[in-house]
Image (cartoon, rainbow, N blue to C red):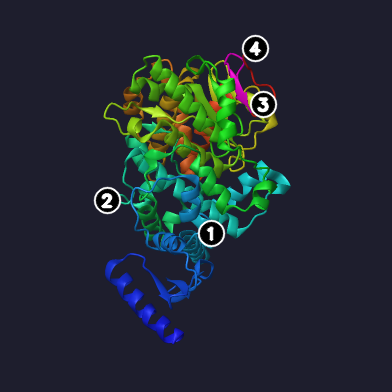
Amino acid sequence: MVKLAEHMLDGYLATRIRQTGRRYVGVLTDGAEWRLYHRIDDRLQQVEKATRAIDPSNPDVDELLSWLEAVLAAGRRIKPTPGEIDRKLGAGSPSYALDSAELAAIYARSRNLPTVRVKRDMWAKLLTTASGTGFTDDDWLFVNHTLLVTMADVIGHAVVGFQPEAPTISAATIMSGELFAQSQIGGVVESDFFGWIVEVPGGEQFIKDLARRLTRFAWGQVEHDVMKALYESIIPEHIRHQFGEYYTPDWLAEEIIDKCADDPVNQRVLDASCGSGTFLFHAARRYIAAAEAAGRLGPDVVREVGDHVIGFDVHPVAVTLARVTYLLAIGTDRLQASDRPAFSVSVYLADSLRWGKESVLWSDEGLGVLTDLDHESFIDDPASAGEVDPARQLRFPDGLVANAGRFNQLVSELADKATERERGTPATSPTAIFDRFEIHDDDRPVLERTFRNMCELHDKGKDHIWGYYVRNVARPAWLARPDNRVDVLLGNPPGWPTAS
């Protein structure tokens, strides 16, 4: 009977998928055992980890209803508490069982494609540099990191009000951060190692299905670092400890911020190993409350919070989660207000223990990033100090880097303009970009040389991570300079200037 039922279910699911172009799942039950099925590679497969057995003599109705809701994604306006996130999206949920199995199948079909191999190699190099012997190059981890980052990108769009589930918004748009750039929100979603999913068959549908499930949560009702709950559920404890990851409970982070940030309107708080952003969440909330109580207007608060609360981490997944946590701290009402200004989220991919090497990026003329460094692993060349051929650098005047939001947007636009042209064709003038950003005449020759270097990198096929690298390395290095101040320092990297 089970085989017959599975055969009938397979035919029904295949028909519905063909008719609608959407993913469907099926449930077989005798009332006591509930089995979840989906179609992978055109055949029915049971999702073993999602099976539920109910005791007929003492059924737990609430538990069964919760399981069915996670399968069907039928709920709306669900409050995203850590417990609900774990139950409906975490490692023990049918939603995770389905998503991880499907994403693993998509990766298995596509792993030998050049675009996938390049991005996976970049991911492995960065984590090897960040974690040394604590990192194990493993397909399971790459797939789950991809899942976590994709979920964070979707949630980030929902928090700002972009409706990522809408048919008019493609998966590629979600993963590239295009809507954020158009809305002048910097430093949240950017093209990175995990964008491979939109470049392979099945990726578009996977992300859109994921968006429909994630947007059923009421992301405006967040009171904790819920991204931490998601990460800790999906990535097992032994793997997190191999990476040296120990996440601070929300109650403790809030207590520490309350004690240390006693003048939040006039202080700069830095978490130099921010993880998923627990301290950032409470520090940003504290700054916003104090600034509004002091009479600061909403647009000014949103624009200025990024200069008061800053985070770094060396783990690319943690950085993505922390950026979304930062948005959640600002809140949907402020983010979706009609007078919301252009701003940038101040969370960066950086190694806070390596400031001595990164100091060679700076001179009296501003920031200079060498173009012949190993940017996949963010390794600096010790020989890079001193005079360097301008053709080997991307240079940015000091005054531009000081404004994080403006700098992020400028780098993004220059990188996009350099890479959207066909390789080998003449570079078009960046003058219109300079005019829009009101670049001073004295700074234009330096930026024109930088733009030509970006075009040459693109022509040589070396443009895959430049914008990502420059935006992330510049701000941490700028903040580490002796003429800048950090009042509340968490993580305590050596050599950082702090208030007495």
Depth check: 41 or 92 in front?
A: 92
Distance from disc 1 to disc 3, alpha carbons, whole Å, reads 36 Å
> Which residue occupies 31% across, 66% down?
21
Q: Is residue 348 above or below residue 206?
A: above
Distance from disc 1 to disc 4, alpha carbons, whole Å, reads 47 Å
Residue assigned mark 4 = 500
Q: Residue 372 in the image: x percent, y percent?
A: 59, 37
Distance from disc 2 to disc 3, alpha carbons, whole Å, reads 45 Å
Residue assigned mark 2 = 168
Q: Type of residue at label 4?
A: Ser
Q: Secondary structure at mark 2?
A: loop
Q: Which residues are magenta?
A: 480-490
In the image, which is nearer the foreground, mark 1 or mark 3? Answer: 1
Q: Secondary structure at mark 3?
A: loop
Q: Type of residue at label 3?
A: Asn
Q: Residue 79 in the image: x percent, y percent?
A: 40, 45
Distance from disc 4 to disc 3, alpha carbons, whole Å, reads 14 Å
Residue assigned mark 1 = 92
Crowding at mark 2 (Cα within 10 Å: few <14, some 14-19, many 20+)? few
Mark 2–mark 1 CB contact (< 8 Å): no
Q: Quick one: label 1 or label 3, which is nearer the N terminus? A: 1
Mark 1–mark 3 CB contact (< 8 Å): no
Residue assigned mark 3 = 492
The answer to which image quadrant residue 417 occupies is top left
